[in-house]
Amino acid sequence: MRLVVDLNRCQSYGQCVYAAPTVFRFHGEESLEYDYAPGEDTRRDVQRAAAACPVQAITLGAATEPSPLAEERDR
Ligand code: SF4
């Protein structure tokens, strides 16, 4: 699964770290680090993290999915 966090949007609330601690972590006080391609076994936790993020900064998709931008462009 592919995971993207919009770090410009992220306000370091940390909800994702609680929801999926094996995928998200803080480096220092406020700098969020995350696994860009977490295993499928973490999908439920990552979905929970995405739902819990107060600023909807987390986007996830299958590794083989074309990006929405590519789909838009190809129309
Ligand atoms: S829950 Fe959202 S705002 Fe909070 S640290 Fe995670 S990505 Fe950032």
Image (cartoon, rainbow, N blue to C red):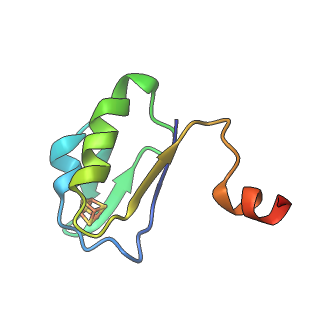
Q: Residue at x 25, y 74 (%)?
A: 11
Q: Residue at x 33, y 64 (%)?
A: 56
Image vertical order of residue 35 relative to residue 40, above or below: below
Image vertical order of residue 21 relative to residue 55, above or below: above
The quadrant of the rendered image in which ligand 1 is seen is bottom left
Q: Residue at x 26, y 47 (%)?
A: 49
On the image, the x and y values in percent for residue 65 come to 66, 41
- Would you say 55 lies left or right of 6 here? left
On the image, the x and y values in percent for residue 67 come to 67, 53
Dividing the picture into quadrants, the one containing residue 54 is: bottom left
Q: Residue furthest bottom?
A: 8
Q: Residue at x 43, y 44 (%)?
A: 35
Image vertical order of residue 29 relative to residue 42, above or below: below
Q: Residue furthest front?
A: 75
Q: Residue furthest top?
A: 41
On the image, the x and y values in percent for residue 69 come to 69, 63
Q: Quadrant of the C terminus?
A: bottom right
